[in-house]
Image (tube, rainbow, N blue to C red):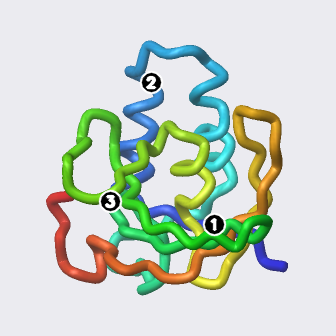
Amino acid sequence: MDNKIFITEKDYLRLTNLLKNLEVEPDILENLEIEIERASILSDDEVPAGLVTMNSTVEYEDLSSGKVTTITIIYPGNETSAGKNISILAPLGSALLGLREGQEINWKFPSGETRRLRVLNVKYQPEANGDWRL
């Protein structure tokens, strides 16, 4: 199975800056740091449709329960009342970032439980919609 992930150059720069400037417990940042380190960086104009980027709305399935959920992956502080937002600092946010539709990942959550997640659909991706300001 292909477990390679990709992030945009813009997301890479914003996320590495975020990690440098946040004052939180190191273990909270560890998952995101690991994902960023293993990611291949794409220029913003190379981003394929179906790739989970920052501010993407993603439908995923928890394969252990069969539950399908739709979320938007956001930067900390960008919470809104509309929809279900997940911070990139949350384990789920960092687990899904950089995956493509159909791709799966085993992810260990803070509870110690490991779950297998599959990206079903990227319902909205800023790059595919020309929303470069996000």
**10 Å neighbourhood of mark 1: few (<14), some, or many (≥20)?**
some
Inspect the image, locate mark 3, and give the three-letter code of the amino acid beneath it: Asn
Between discs 2 and 3, the one toward the N terminus: 2
- Would you say 98 lies left or right of 66 here? left
Mark 2 residue element: helix
- Would you say 29 lies left or right of 122 here? right
Inspect the image, locate mark 2, and give the three-letter code of the amino acid beneath it: Lys
- Residue in front for this viewpoint, 81 or 72: 81
Q: Which residue corresponds to mark 3? A: 55
**10 Å neighbourhood of mark 2: few (<14), some, or many (≥20)?**
few
Rendering coords of residue 1 (x, y %): 84, 79
* Badge number at residue 5: 1
Inspect the image, locate mark 1, and give the three-letter code of the amino acid beneath it: Ile
* Badge number at residue 20: 2
Distance, label 2 to label 3, CA atoms, is 20 Å
Mark 1 residue element: loop
